[in-house]
Image (cartoon, rainbow, N blue to C red):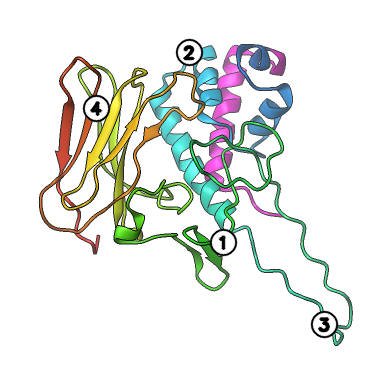
């Protein structure tokens, strides 16, 4: 049986504490959110990773500030993604010389997830878990049983790609974390394995535009399209990092206001 990452167990324990604080029942949680009682039961037991909107509902009902719980959830999400990426092993084929037939192991339960754009989801049981299984194919992350997972692109091969399917979003470094004067959260993130970076925002009004520029690479751009996205983050495509040259710059714009722009130095490629 695949072990649940300890980060996910800690998140589940925190959610149970919040539930007990207000004596919230599964019926109440289901009524106050878009998720079923069975989903809440799995999340509170630590058998699946809840999506952030569900955790946010719990914080609201328990009158708990979100930042601390958000940090727990992000660590749990990263751990769950690593677990899922390494859960697939090549199946051994039985030969005539085998003393007994080889029975392939049952696949680990695959909780569902909603991701933007082109995540490749293989097995979805119900909405609300936070992991995906990525099939090894061109431009996708793959798994090598001797070396662990491999990111799906490096350097300029990453330009414009979604950081999720190529696993550049697993354990990235956060180079900038801030709140703009208008209350929009903004981050610039970098993955040394991919040698690529991207920007993301949250709490951004519909119609806002996020751009991310690295000198010499195509500028990445995304627009906040709708307010009910189950993923709280809206993020750009990847841009290759050269390790030298002008700083990387992210700008948040909502017409007719001028853009809010922020820059950070490019990290060296050996970081």
Counting from the top left corner in percent of width and height, residue 13 is at 58, 33
Counting from the top left corner in percent of width and height, residue 112 is at 64, 38
**Magenta segment boundaries in residue numbering:** 1-27
Question: Which secondary structure lies at badge 3?
Answer: loop
Question: Which secondary structure lies at badge 2?
Answer: loop
User: Gap in Å between the C-alphas at discs 4 and 2?
Assistant: 30 Å
User: Gap in Å between the C-alphas at discs 1 and 2?
Assistant: 43 Å
First of labels 1, 2 by sequence position:
2
Please give the name of the residue rendered at 65% of the width and 65% of the height, measured from the top-left corner: 89
Please give the name of the residue rendered at 53% of the width and 48% of the height, measured from the top-left corner: 81
Q: Which disc number belongs to residue 252? A: 4
Q: Which disc number belongs to residue 95? A: 3
User: Gap in Å between the C-alphas at discs 3 and 2?
Assistant: 60 Å
Task: Indicate the quadrant containing the C terminus: top left, top right, bottom left or bottom right.
Answer: bottom left
Task: Indicate the quadrant containing the N terminus: top left, top right, bottom left or bottom right.
Answer: bottom right
User: Gap in Å between the C-alphas at discs 3 and 4?
Assistant: 59 Å
**Residue 160 to residue 65: above or below:** below
First of labels 4, 1 by sequence position:
1
Q: Which disc number belongs to residue 136? A: 1
Please give the name of the residue rendered at 78% of the width and 65% of the height, measured from the top-left corner: 104
Judged by depth in the image, the label closer to the viewer, 3 or 4, is 4
Q: For the view shown, which residue lies furthest in the right direction?
A: 100
41 falls in the magenta region: no
91 horizontally vs 222: left or right:
right
Question: Which secondary structure lies at badge 4?
Answer: strand
Residue 34 location, quadrant = top right
**Residue 206 to residue 263: above or below:** above
State the residue in front, 116 or 106.
Answer: 116
Question: Which residue is identified by label 2?
Answer: 63
């Amino acid at each position: 049986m695949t072990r649940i990452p300890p980060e996910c167990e800690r998140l589940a324990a925190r959610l149970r504490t919040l539930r007990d604080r207000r004596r919230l029942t599964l019926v109440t949680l289901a009524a106050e959110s878009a998720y079923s009682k069975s989903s809440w039961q799995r999340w509170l037991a630590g058998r699946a990773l809840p999506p952030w909107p569900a955790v946010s509902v719990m914080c609201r009902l328990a009158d708990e500030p979100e930042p601390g719980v958000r940090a727990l959830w992000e660590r749990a999400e990263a751990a769950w993604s690593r677990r899922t990426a390494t859960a697939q092993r090549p199946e051994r084929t039985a030969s005539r010389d085998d003393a007994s037939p080889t029975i392939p192991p049952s696949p680990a339960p695959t909780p569902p997830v909603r991701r933007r754009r082109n995540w490749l989801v293989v097995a979805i049981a119900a909405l609300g878990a936070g992991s995906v299984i990525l099939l090894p194919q061109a431009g996708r992350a793959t798994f090598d049983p001797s070396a662990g997972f491999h990111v799906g692109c490096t350097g300029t091969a990453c330009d414009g790609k979604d950081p999720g399917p190529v696993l550049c979003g697993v354990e990235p470094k956060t180079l900038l974390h801030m709140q703009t004067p208008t209350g929009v959260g903004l981050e610039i993130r970098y993955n040394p394995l991919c040698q690529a970076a991207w920007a993301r925002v949250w709490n951004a009004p519909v119609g806002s535009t996020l751009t991310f520029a690295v000198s010499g690479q195509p500028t990445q751009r995304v627009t906040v399209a709708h307010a009910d996205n189950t993923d709280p983050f809206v993020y750009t495509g990847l841009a290759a990092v050269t390790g030298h040259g002008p700083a990387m710059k992210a700008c948040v714009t909502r017409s007719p206001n001028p853009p809010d722009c922020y820059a950070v130095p490019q990290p060296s490629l050996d970081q």
